[in-house]
Amino acid sequence: MTAAIEVENLRCEFRVRTGLMSAEKRVIAVDDVTFSVPAGSVLGVVGESGCGKSTLARLILGLLKPTAGTVLVDGKRLFDLDRKARARLIQPVFQDPFASLNPRRRIRDIVALPLEAQGTFTRGEIARRVGGILERVGLSAAMGERMPAQLSGGQRQRAAIARALVLEPRIVICDEPTSALDVSVQAQILNLLADLRRDLGLTYLFISHNLAVVEHVASEVAVMYLGRIVERNETDALFRTPRHPYTKALLESVLTPEPGRGVPDIGLGDAMPDPSNIPPGCRFNPRCRIAVERCRHEAPAHMVRPPQGMVECHLA
Amino acid sequence: MSALLEVEELQVMFGGRTAAVRGVSFRVEKGETHCLVGESGCGKSVTALAVMNLLARGGQRSAKRMSFAGTDLTSLSDREMARLRGNRMAMIFQEPMTSLNPAFTIGSQMAEVLTRHKGASRAAALDRAAELMGRVGITAPGMRLGQFPHQLSGGLRQRVMIAMALMCDPELLIADEPTTALDVTVQAQILRLLASLKREFGLSILLITHDLGIVARVADHVSVMYAGEVVERAPTAELFRAPQHPYTRGLLSCVPVPGRAQRDKPLGSIPGIVPTIGPDFTGCAFRSRCAHANETCAREIPRRPAGEAHDYLCRLEPDWAELQPA
Amino acid sequence: MSAPIAIQAPQTSRIGTAGFAIGIAIVAIVLAAALIGNWLVPQDPFTQDLGNRLKPPFWMEGSEAGHLLGTDQLGRDYLARLVYGARISLLIGIMTVITSGLIGITLGVLGGFFGGRVDDFVLFAITTRLSIPVVLVALAVVGLMGSGLGLVVATLGLLLWDRFAVVARATTMQVRNHDYVSAAWCAGASMPHILIKEILPNIASHLAVVATLEMALAILLEAALSFLGLGVPPPLPSWGLMIAEGKDYMFFSPWVIMIPGVALAVLVLGINLVGDGLRNLLGAERLR
């Protein structure tokens, strides 16, 4: 199956100065990330704060310049294209429905923006397409006339999805699209995203910290920690037999609605991941329950595990 | 047997027009964790603020009964209430980023609680602060006393909040979404911490959350709130085993459970959105989204019993099966 | 604290909203005077009547019918001059704000949005401007190039843009991080569109507050310049000029200096009240 999107050795470094007198620190937000997503499927990217998943999204979307690496969409180098061409291929759905719509513009104008920016559509075509996509996401034409403040969180997220799809892109980057929504609304939006993917043949990169949601949505899952993908596998395989100690800890932390089971002891310790201070050796070693001496000096190699998946751990 | 915190028919109105809480009743027994669970706008946070008398200007509360350890909370003056707050009843909030004053050191903020309520000396207060920080799992507590909030991560700040809440050895801890802003691995640590403190200090906890996973793992009793009312209450195991109210059932079907994902089937969902409730509203607030609503739902709704300490607010009989939509 | 803490934003107090209303009323009256005043007042502000010099206004004895606010040292009707002066003050205020606003907002938005070298340049420009003493430079320019309405507007406009720039830069830096700007970027929108349609409308309310305050400042500065003889040239009845002319008659005909002085103070007060009220409205709106 052809890959809709291929990411190769993507790297993003920042230089941060924490104070006037202190030295510059190097923050490696994304470190040599490589993966590909087959057309029509969903890759879930999970991880906690500091893991770089949001930075990864912004790199792919062109909001940040990578320090190294490249992204191919349908074989074309994404960074060689101008913004208008990129817009036709790849679009975002962001986390906060309150912040992702311009509070001073009407919904239909917001949704029409990608079409207007292309400069090749007539006003009639724009109106027609906007009407069509609004209906497709479950918003009435009347709601198109409203301002974002008059819509609920779920309706705003539908508008954001409409804006992302109005140009009929190949790939949609969903950056925590339901994390800011109520549970009942979250389910509506996830169902909508699934329907649209099937009907329009889209490919998703679905970023989330919520493992249960990712399991429901994604066909393959990549786990990120401090800028690297530490494990990747087909969803069912990853959830059934996680290989990396961090993946295991993450899965154990998920509190399923099953009473009587108490809260598990993850045993990760107190050290918080700090992208400006990446530990030597395996970056997970200060918090790893099974770390050995080798883990503190030697970074683990990228190990591909047939029939699918990879993991970066000495002990996996 | 009287409970530690008893709230009966609490009403909270804002500006005389918006009814945020409409007749909420619940009890927190000594040594137990009671969860108020619901989605945004259901009134759970407002309920907690009303109990602590921390409502914003324009909010009016009234209750048939609201008592803490036998003392009637509604009759207390502001000064008497201030003596209770932070002392015997403590509260921690959702956003660890904004809960601590960035201009003062951790130590001075924590010490202030003890010096104010118990008249302790500053040195004694700082000692206790260090001791409590150690108990909540903060490493190098002596050093932390001199640090400022921005030097700590979110998880550490939340632990500091918990330690600060425990300074005066409260009987009741009210926690409003204490782990929502934290990573999932840190969340597990904080919840374990709260459970162990409950055992160690004999603490009772009123926990407010929207996360049913937390409720299942942590709560002894649950009150499910919707649009300002408690639509169902039950012991935890009972609620998950046999939920009665259509909203509770809908909510449970919405939550994706790892290990039971069915990718080709849509997730259960509840259509529509939460309605805004004016002061003249009658009947069931959920009827606009309920598949089983009929005309009787616009009138007074009975509160039906459904088992041991389990009741719910609906016209449907207990253990109703999937009926034909009305 | 023994009082319940207000967890949410406190609503604007009664006094605050009253101030806003008063401010708007004052500005509206002055605006009306500027626009139609000289049609309503029959006298001409420039006609001299040396036989009727320094007549007192209607509330003092010795006043003359037909001159409600008396006459000045050349017999010109004071009410007519006052009303005409309102036009000058407002004109200068508005034109200066437009000029300085254009300069300051452009610099601030560009610096705030692009950061890096552009921002370094903008900050340098702002710091340079702040190190210049405005009144002295205005005096020097006008002294060298002669006085005149246009010159005053140009000078003040080129000097008073710093607050616009600072506020525009700060608010742009906040708004730039919002997801709707990122979404517009990803949608392929052009830079002008992003700056004008996405950023600007969302910082406009803050800039409106700055505009009111800068307008008040411009009006005061022009009055000061005119007082020193370096602003609007006579016989144009700028209020500053009227104050200057009135100081010679301060002891025997105090109304000559009092009337324009009070008018100036009231106008500046009104504009500031409007600015305060806008800022309050803004605060409440943001926290909702």
Image (tube, helix red, strand yellow):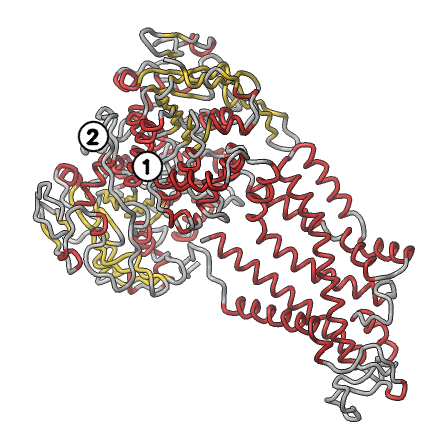
The N terminus of chain C sits in image quarter: bottom left
Q: Quadrant of residue A184?
A: top left
Sooner in the amino-acid sequence: mark 1 or mark 2: 1
C66 horizontally vs B233: left or right:
right
The dot on residue B279 is none
Mark nearer the viewer, 1 or 2: 1
Residue A261 is labelled as 2
Residue that mark 1 sits on: A189
- Which amino acid, by three-letter code, is at mark 1? Ile
For image coordinates 42% across by 53% down, the residue present is B116
Find numbered disc 1 in the image and state the secondary structure of the residue it sits on. helix
In the displayed structure, would residue B301 be above or below residue C88? above
Subunit under mark 1: A
Whether residue B18 is situated above or below residue C39 in the rendered picture: above
Q: Residue furthest right?
A: C144
Q: How many marks?
A: 2
